[in-house]
Structures are given as structure tokens and as C-alpha cells.
Amino acid sequence: MDGFNKNGDSSTLAFVISCNLMGAISFKEFKEYFYCLVRNNDVDKIPLFIWDLIELEENERFLIYNVLGFTPSGGLKPTEKDAIYGIAIQRFKAFFDIPISENEALTALKENQHILDRFKKTFPFIKM
């Protein structure tokens, strides 16, 4: 599957994990993404670690990289990562534990519209 390769392109997996850990999606939505992935793909082509991610509990969410056994690479620029915080702020309004100001995050989102487009494409079940 494109974007999920341990020894190749892992950009989709990295984006989904970043959205979860940076607060742009809830843990429930994180798991829903993988349920959708399983429903919409040939089970034989789904990497085995996806099943392990589905089994994670919310209190184990910071163990994602341990479960995977590798750190996916998303290739996002710092301002694109800041844009993910902008999505989190837009969706959940108040946000307390981010390394930049709300204004910086929202500006980054405005300047990186492609990140919002990617978010909507990656998570079609989430209404913005």
C-alpha cells in the first residue's frame, strides 16, 4: 500500500499519526481511519502493523512508534506541521499544549492550504 511502507514511502502513515499526536484528530478518529482502511482495501495487502494499531487503547497512543517498530517519514516542512496545529485549533477551538501560538498555527494553515486539502482527503469521514 502506498504511503505505508516500512522501508519506503511511509508518508500517509506519518501524516495520520501526526494528525493524531498533534491533536487535529481524536484517538477515536485515528482508529476510525484504520477501520476504513481495512474496509476499503484488500486484506492481504494491508501491512500487519495496521492490525496492531487498531488494537491500541487511547492510553497507549504514545506507544505508536513502539508498535510499528519504525518511525514513518512524512517529509513535512515545519510550516506544514504548524498547519496541522491550525487544523486542531479550527476543529477543537481551545488548545493548550502546542509549541506555537494559535495565531501562528492558523497563519500556517492559511499559507498551506494543501495540508487542509490533504486532511480532508485522508479523513473523508470528518466534517470540517
Image (cartoon, helix red, strand yellow):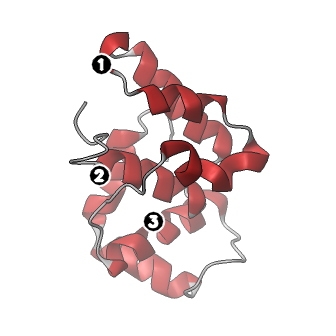
Where is residue 42 shown, x and y percent of the image?
31, 11
Q: Quick check: marks 1 and 3 in contact, CB under 8 Å? A: no
Left or right of 111 on screen, residue 72: right
Where is residue 87 shown, x and y percent of the image?
49, 62
Q: Point out the image quarter for the N terminus.
A: top left
Whether residue 8 is visible to the viewer of this picture, yes or no, is yes
Residue type, mark 2 in image: Ser
Instruction: Please tell me how crowded label 1 is: few (under 14), some (14-19), or many (20+) other residues with Cα within 10 Å.
Output: few
Q: Which label's residue is closer to the chain start, 2 or 3?
A: 2
Query: Disc 1 and disc 2: Cα gap in Å?
Result: 17 Å
Q: Which residue is mark 2?
A: 11
Along the viewing direction, whichever of 95 and 51 lies nearer the viewer = 51
Along the viewing direction, whichever of 72 and 122 lies nearer the viewer = 72
User: What residue sits 64% from the left and 52% below the top?
Assistant: 63
Left or right of 43 on screen, residue 93: right
Q: Secondary structure at mark 1?
A: helix
User: What residue sits 48% from the left and 48% below the top?
Assistant: 69
Query: Disc 1 and disc 3: Cα gap in Å?
Result: 29 Å
Q: Which residue is mark 3?
A: 84
Up-down relation of residue 123 to residue 76 (above or below): above
